[in-house]
Image: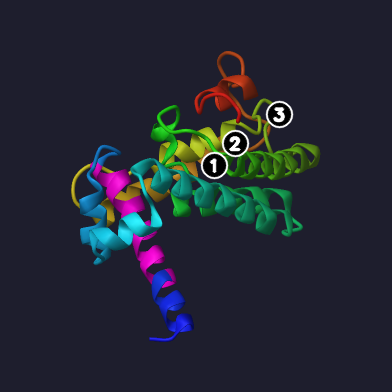
Amino acid sequence: MSGRGRQAEAARNDLRLLRAAHEVFTTQGFDAPVSAIARQAGVGMGSLYRRYRTKEELLQRLCLIAMERVAEAAETALADDDPWSGLEAYVRACVDLRSGALAPVAGTIEVTPEMWRASQRATELAGRLVARAHAAGVLRQDVTTLDLPLLIEQFSRPAPGPPDPVHEHVRRRLLAIALDGLRAPGRTPLPGDPPGAEWYEGRWGERP
C-alpha cells in the first residue's frame, strides 16, 4: 500500500474510532472499556492505541471536536439574516450533534489549551447570537449566553433503553416547547441569578 493509501486508511480508522467512542461513552458511560470502542469501530486495539495512548486523550479529542462543531453551528446561524431563525437553528443543530453529551466528563479529564481556545471561540460566537436576538427583541432579556449550552446539554443526553423512534419524537416535541420558552417577552420570570462564566468554566477545572 502506498503512503497516501496508508494515510487514507488511518484517517478512516480514526473517524470510525471517534464515532464509536462517542456512541459508547454516551450510551454505556465514561467508564466503558476502550475495548468496546475498538470492537464497535471494527478496528484492533493496536490501531486504537497507536492513535490514542489513553482514554483521556480520546475524550479530549472528542470534546475538542464537539466544541469546534458548536462554533461552526454558530457561524452558520450568524449568516442567517433573521435573528430568531438563526438562534433556533443553532440550538437545533447543537442538539442534533449531541454537543452537550460529553458534559458529564467535566472535571474528570485535563483540559488542553486547544480545548480552552475552542470553548472560548464557541462561547464568543454564541454571545453574538444572543446579543443579536436581544437587540431584535425576539429573545427574552433574562436569557443569557450560558443558558443555551446548558439547555443543549439537557437535550443531548441519550434516552434510556435501546434506540426507539418514539424517543426522538418526544425529544423534538420537548425541544419545540423549550425553544418557545426562549422567545420574548417571556411570561414567567426565571428563578434566581443566571449562571456565571466562573461557575460554568469551573466545572472543567483550572484553565491551562
Residue 25 position by quadrant? top left
- Looking at the image, residue 203 lies above or below residue 153: above
Q: Amino acid at mark 3?
A: Gln
Tell me how many marks there are: 3
Q: Which residue is mark 3?
A: 141
Nearer-N-terminus badge (2/3): 3
| Label 2 element class | helix
Question: As rendered, which of 37 and 194 lies closer to the eye?
Answer: 37
Between the residue at mark 2 and the residue at mark 3, the CA separation in whole angstroms equals: 9 Å
- CB within 8 Å, label 1 to label 2: yes
Examine the structure image and report whether residue 69 is included in the region drawn in magenta.
no
Q: Which mark is residue 182?
A: 2
The local secondary structure at tag 1 comes to helix
Q: Is residue 169 visible?
A: no
**Placement of 65 over or under 55, stated as above or below:** below
Asked where in the image residue 155 lies, by quadrant, the reply is: top left
Q: Position of residue 39 (x, y in %)?
A: 20, 60
User: In the rendering, at what x and y percent does residue 61 appear?
Assistant: 47, 49
Does the stretch in magenta take in 20? Answer: yes
Extent of the magenta region = 11-28
**Residue designated by label 1:** 179
The image quadrant that residue 118 belongs to is top right
Asked if residue 192 is positioned above or below residue 140 in the image, the reply reads above
Q: Position of residue 129 (x, y in %)?
A: 71, 44
